[in-house]
Amino acid sequence: MLDVCLLGTSGMMPLPKRLLTAFMTRYNGSSVLIDCGEGTQIAIKKKGWSFKPIDVICFTHFHADHISGLPGLLLTMGNAERTEDLTIIGPKGVENVVNSLRVIAPELPFKINFIEINKNIEEFIINGYKITAFKVNHNVTCYGYKIEIERNGKFMIDKANEYNIPKKYWSRLQNGEIIHEDGKEYTPDMVLGEKRKGLKVVYCTDTRPLPVISEMACRADLFVCEGMYGEKGKEAKAKEYKHMTFYEAAKLAKAAKPKQMWLTHYSPSLIKPEEFMNEVKKIYPHSYPGKDGKSLELLFEED
C-alpha cells in the first residue's frame, strides 16, 4: 500500500486556506516529500503524519514557493531525534541552495546526502521507491517526478523445494537478493514468477505541456499536475510565465490515461477551482481539483 497526500496546492504565495506546494508519500515505513513550500509542517501535522520517517526530499526547482519551508522542517526533524541519513534530490546546485538555507538551521543530528540531477531523465532506487526525475519546461531548471513501487513475482514454493533451497534464504530471495553459500548460487529468478503490476504516481508542476509528461504519467495510478489557471483567456499568461491551464493539464491526462488526475499549484487569484471542472472533465473525465490534505491509499492489485 502507498499512501499519498497533497499537502499544499497554492502557487506563488500561501493563502489562509491554501498552503504552498508540497506532496508526500508513505510506503513501508519510509516517506518521500516532493517540494517543501511555506506551511508544509502545518500540513503534515494537520494530516497526522510524522516528520521523522521522511527519508527523501525531492525538489522540482528552487523558486521560493517550493523550498521556503525546508529550514524549519529540517530543524523539526532534528528535534524529533532523527539520526538516520536524509537524501535530498534536486536540480544542479541543490547542495549549495540547501546549505545556504541552512544558515538558520546549521546543527542537525543527521547527515544530508545530496543527489544532483544532471540528465533530462534520471532514476534513483531508495528505500523501496523507484524515483524517476524528468526535465520539464519552466523559466528555471525544473523536474517532474515519477514514483514507482515495483512488485516482484509470487514466490513459488515448489520451485524452491525443487532446487533444494534452504528455507532460511527464501525471504531474502523474495526481496531480490542473490545468495552465495557453500559454492552454490541462489538467484531470485529461480523462485519468483513474473513481475506483478506495481504502483505509480507522477507529480509535475511549473511547466508548459510536454510529451514527456504524458509518457511518464501513462497509466499511472495517480497523476498530480499543475493547473495554474482555470479562467478562460489566461493562455497567453500561462505561456509567458511557463505554467499550465487546467485544460492543458487535462489534455496531458487524456493522452496518459491515469486512473485519476489531480490539479494543483493554483494561482492566488483562483479562488474556487471546482467551478471550472465541468469543462475539464469534458477533456478527461477522471480529473479532480486538488485541495490541501487531499489523500489517497493506493493498493496493489489482487493476484
Image (cartoon, rainbow, N blue to C red):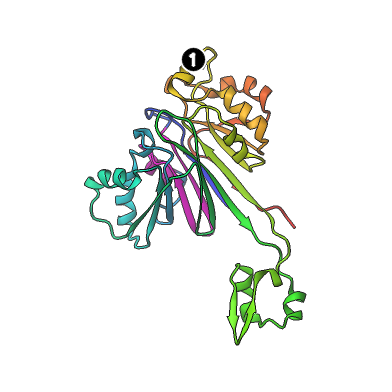
Q: Which residues are magenta?
A: 19-46
Residue beneath the point at 60% across and 48% down = 297
Q: Position of residue 270 (x, y in %)?
A: 47, 21
Q: Is residue 28 visible?
A: yes
Q: Quadrant of residue 8?
A: top left
Position of residue 73 in the picture relative to residue 283 (left or right): left
Dot 1 falls on a residue whose secondary structure is: helix
**84 over 146 or under it: above or below:** below
Packing grade of label 1 (10 A; few <14, some 14-19, many >=20) is few
- Name the residue furthest top: 233
Instruction: Based on the picture, tell me whether residue 54 belongs to the magenta stretch.
Output: no
Q: Quadrant of residue 190?
A: bottom right
Q: Nearer the viewer, residue 70 or 257?
A: 257
Instruction: Based on the picture, tell me whether residue 22 belongs to the magenta stretch.
Output: yes
Q: Position of residue 142 (x, y in %)?
A: 44, 36
**51 over 175 or under it: above or below:** above
Find disc 1 in the rendering and name its residue.
236
Position of residue 61 in the picture relative to residue 277 (left or right): left
Q: Position of residue 265 (x, y in %)?
A: 47, 30
